[in-house]
Amino acid sequence: MQPALEICNLSKSYGPATVVRDLSFAIAPGEIFGLLGPNGAGKSTTINMVAGVGRSDQGSISVFGHDTRRDYRTTRRLIGVMHQEIVIDNFFTIERALAIHSGYYGVPDDPRWRATLIERLGLGPHLKKPMMKLSGGLKRRFMVAKALIHRPPLLILDEPTAGVDVELRRTLWDFVCEINTAGTTVLLTTHYLEEAEAMCGRIAIMNHGRLIALEPTTDLVARLGGRRIILHLQEPMNQLPGSLGEHGAQLEAGGRAISVSFAESFDATALLRELARLEIAVRDIETRRTGLEEIFVELTGMTDRRREVGNR
């Protein structure tokens, strides 16, 4: 079976700055695939090259077996892209824009599908409004509808829920899951890592233009994750006793809590016995599973950058 999207040895530079470095991965038909990374990692540049609005310096991109350079017209019809930046025609109404947009891809307008998008994305009451009169959330709803209007089998969502309210986020993810169940492949970038963990079957993480992780989400969390115990203290501490440091403990919350990260096999009884020996009064005990956010921070080096900022 042909991959829905296959990227091989892709690189892109702007002057002396290389923003994508020898990137390779493939997405199977029917996947919801997460492409994650900090700002400047190269995600949007990669998406622009896939969508045909940016050219690579080297490497190849194919969509359902069609090369994006040789078969440009075909691959454009196969892809729907919601870009991170809001791209609209300020003087068109929603109704007019959606009625003509599929024609840009050489696809006849489908009034029934257009009505479905309008209903599912809550655009019905706003059809006669020009784009300049829409709120930011409504503009993003329109951009999702525009990306899907020609019924592409590959949907690319670049930060689709940035700055939108909770209701729209839920509406959008429900609809994305629905069209994915019907066969649409989805490539998602987001800074809401809990969304990626819940939605994506596999995740790729980029940093400084390179791919630094690529595996099923559950495997990534299981391999690099763990648990954390947080001990909320009756009285704050100025300094952590050395014997607790041997357990990997750290002071948090201005000395009002002690946290310890540990693997699944960790035995907490020794830690609790040491707390009792030191007569440290604990008000509450909390445990947390390490999630994708903590793994992302560790892999991309953001932990070290946060420490540097905190020490200034």
Image: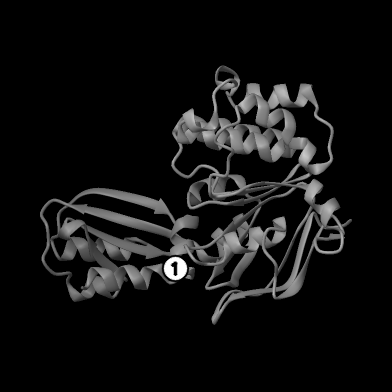
Q: Amino acid at mark 1?
A: Glu
Q: Nearer the viewer, residue 170 or 261?
A: 170
122 lies above or below 172: above
> Which quadrant holds the C terminus?
bottom left
Name the residue at 83% across, 37% down: 107
Label 1 element class: helix
Determine the image quadrant of residue 213: bottom right
Name the residue at 29% across, 71% down: 307
Q: Nearer the viewer, residue 88 or 222?
A: 88
Q: Coloring scheme of the render?
A: one colour
185 lies above or below 18: above
Count residues near mark 1 (Cα–Cα under 10 Å), then give few for <14, some for 14-19, many for 20+. few
Q: Residue at label 1?
A: 298
Q: Residue furthest bottom?
A: 16
Name the residue at 54% across, 32% down: 131
**Residue 178 rendering spot, x and y as whole percentages:** 69, 33
Determine the image quadrant of residue 124: top right
**Residue 210 rendering spot, x and y as whole percentages:** 59, 73
